[in-house]
Image: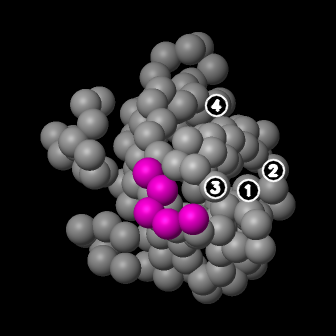
Amino acid sequence: MTTEQICKELESFYRSYIAAFNREDIDAFSETFTYPYAWVSGRHGLSECRTESDHQSSFGKIMADLKHRGWVRSDIDQLNAWPLAEDLAMILADVSRYKSDGSVLERVRACYTLRRDAGTWKIVTLAEIRPPFLGPGNVAR
């Protein structure tokens, strides 16, 4: 498999991931993760999500908070993918979250590590990249 083919798979994966998030399809969204997986942040260190049940509970809380703040959808602004091996990769994505009036609720940048599990890409780790830092590749926002 070529680097270009893997990048296309990763881009397709991420678009499906955001589509499931926007539909609030908890089952499809949960299938994009491997268990356990980890959130990594400077503030909180490593936070592990051990089971799909834990993930679905967390997802419900995240969605409730976003909706409380006016969220209606998220759009991908920029997506970069780097294969690290045939079964390991990294994605850097910029996403805008929108309110019902079309205004931007927030813009986020995140970095994901993924592995191919039984032929399907799954998220192993994710980390938010806060301004002014650019993250892997020093890709402009």
For marks 1 and 3 on the same chain, the one whose residue lies earlier in the sequence = 3
Number of residues whose C-alpha sits closer than 10 Å to that of mark 1, classed few (under 14), some (14–19) or many (20 or more): many
Q: CA distance from mark 3 to mark 2?
A: 31 Å
For the image shown, how many numbered marks are present on the structure? Answer: 4
Quick check: 112 above or below 102? below
Taking the spot 65% from the left edge, 30% from the top edge, the residue there is 72
Across and down, in percent, residue 46 comes to: 37, 79
For marks 1 and 4 on the same chain, the one whose residue lies earlier in the sequence = 1
Q: Secondary structure at mark 1?
A: helix
| Apparent side of residue 37 relative to residue 33 in the rendered image (left or right) | left
For marks 4 and 2 on the same chain, the one whose residue lies earlier in the sequence = 2
Identify residue for label 2.
25
Q: Which residues are magenta?
A: 82-86
Which image quadrant for residue 86? bottom right
Q: CA distance from mark 4 to mark 2?
A: 13 Å
Identify residue for label 1.
29
Taking the spot 26% from the left edge, 46% from the top edge, the residue there is 137
Which image quadrant for residue 109? top left
For marks 3 and 4 on the same chain, the one whose residue lies earlier in the sequence = 3
Q: CA distance from mark 1 to mark 2?
A: 6 Å
Q: Nearer the viewer, mark 1 or mark 3?
A: 3
Q: Secondary structure at mark 2?
A: loop
Identify residue for label 3.
1
**Circle 2: residue type:** Asp
For marks 3 and 2 on the same chain, the one whose residue lies earlier in the sequence = 3
Q: Nearer the viewer, residue 128 or 53?
A: 128
Q: Nearer the viewer, residue 93 or 85?
A: 85
Q: CA distance from mark 1 to mark 4?
A: 14 Å
Identify residue for label 4.
73
Q: Secondary structure at mark 4?
A: strand
